[in-house]
Amino acid sequence: MSAADIIVLSASVAAVAGLGWFFFAPRKAHTARMGVGVQRVEVVVRGGYRPDVIRVRQGVPVELVFDRQESGDCTSRVVFGDFAVSAALPAHTRTTVRLDPLRAGSFGFACGMNMIHGTLIVDPADEPAIPPAGPVDPAVASPAQAGPAAVDVEAAQARERRAELADLTRRVLLGAVLTAPVLFAVMAHELFGAGWVPSLLLNHWLQLALITPVMLYTGAPIHRTGWLALAHRSADMNSLITLGTAAAYGYSLLVTVAPGVLPADLREVYFEAVGVILTLILLGRLLEARAKAGTGEAIRALLGLAARTARVVRDGAEVEIPVDEVALGDEVVIRPGEKIPVDAIVLAGSSAVDESMVTGEPMPVTKRAGDTVIGATINGTGSLRVRAAKVGHIVASLKQAGRHHECRIEECAGLSRRFGNQDYREGGRHAGADNREESRAHCQPGRGGDREWRAVPGK
């Protein structure tokens, strides 16, 4: 073995060891600041979570302020599976997520696509944490907190997706127009030996001029996310594409600019591969964004079916309040022709209710004392007095259905591997197969300037 071989081998081993340390070495945990009865930590969301390892103390409520400095679907949601919390993170917005760490241990959190991960380390307290008194029904979330936030989140996500669609469309069109002639010339000449291909299209300098905008502009979203992921000491599909296309483009650039530094049989260029890969990846993202935009429009249309106000009995008098303020157990008076504001149980009265928007049946259904009525259905000719049984149910269900529809095959597989058979959702129940005790939680958006989501564990 020559000295040159030894040097190359040593450099390779050192590079592999360095990369292994960079990606797999333990990461320093960031300790949350202790305030008045609350722990607070700020997390920057830009290609990853920074810090991605957070240390808090058991039994003290935690406020995690996510400062999302990017757009796109990957980081548009953060999921704390062990706390049954799934919170939306609007683009370029600070969002506060509240947790009650009642158990010590290490708990992972991730983006909605399970591609970006972080760890919440809960150190044991001197005294055991005491859960809040009184269980919380996980199927019920107060619409005073869930309703407006759900609509606001859907509207913000709709604006973000419209902007993303316009941007992706421009990038894909440019990539397709500039890549097509290079791909056509190379495939016809190399695969079919066509002699009629213009030599101009096979010129390396022309291919460099055509593919450079594709590399720098069309592939910019991929490169930005890929390099940021590497900077966060992690790697994903974007990192793979970025490194591959950068290597192919850089090698082709070297062949074009200084062909003499390489042997004659190693002077092939790969500009067409760079253009095709980047354009097809962006085309897939464009199609996915269009599908999600259609789902969001359907969810917003369904949310628009809900009643805006409700007439409740307070202190013996009927008071008209926003439907968001209806609480579980409130008595609601429904006059003829009005929409039923929430799922409820009929206390008194009799009427035919149009449930076609829920069941599809055109014939009204007669409701009497003891029957259940569904929110957003329409009361007929009679008056009803009902007791609110489920509030915020439609909003939570629609949002969960929308997220399920948008979840791609690989995302579902990743989430299944991570959370097993756990069921986490806003206003949902969390029960792991390996857990020995059940927990109840619901997400409550706050009313402050920043968005706030709170998980309230019960028994």
Image (cartoon, rainbow, N blue to C red):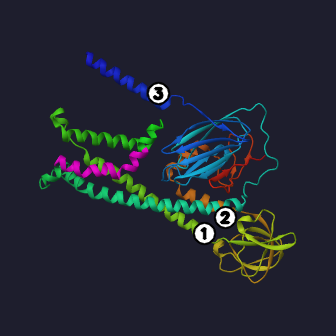
Give the labeled residue for mark 1.
302
Give the labeled residue for mark 2.
394
Residue projecting furthest to the right: 316
Quadrant hosting residue 43 = top right
Mark 3, residues whose alpha carbon is within 10 Å: few (<14), some, or many (≥20)?
few
281 and 161: which is toward the camera: 161
Q: Is residue 94 magenta?
A: no
Q: Position of residue 11 (x, y in %)?
A: 34, 23
Seen at 81% across and 66% down, the residue is: 330
Quadrant (top left/top right/bottom left/bottom right) for the N terminus: top left
Marks 2 and 1, the one that precedes in the sequence: 1
Q: Amino acid at mark 3?
A: Trp
Can residue 351 be seen?
A: yes
Q: For mark 2, give the secondary structure.
A: helix
Q: Position of residue 410 (x, y in %)?
A: 50, 48
Callouts 2 and 1 close, C-beta under 8 Å: yes
Q: Is residue 288 above or below residue 273?
A: below
Q: For mark 3, give the secondary structure.
A: helix
Q: Amino acid at mark 1?
A: Leu
Seen at 17% across and 50% down, the residue is: 202
Q: Position of residue 42 (x, y in %)?
A: 59, 42
Give the labeled residue for mark 3.
21
Q: Amino acid at mark 2?
A: Ile
Query: Which numbered marker is on residue 223?
Result: none
Q: Position of residue 400 (x, y in %)?
A: 61, 58
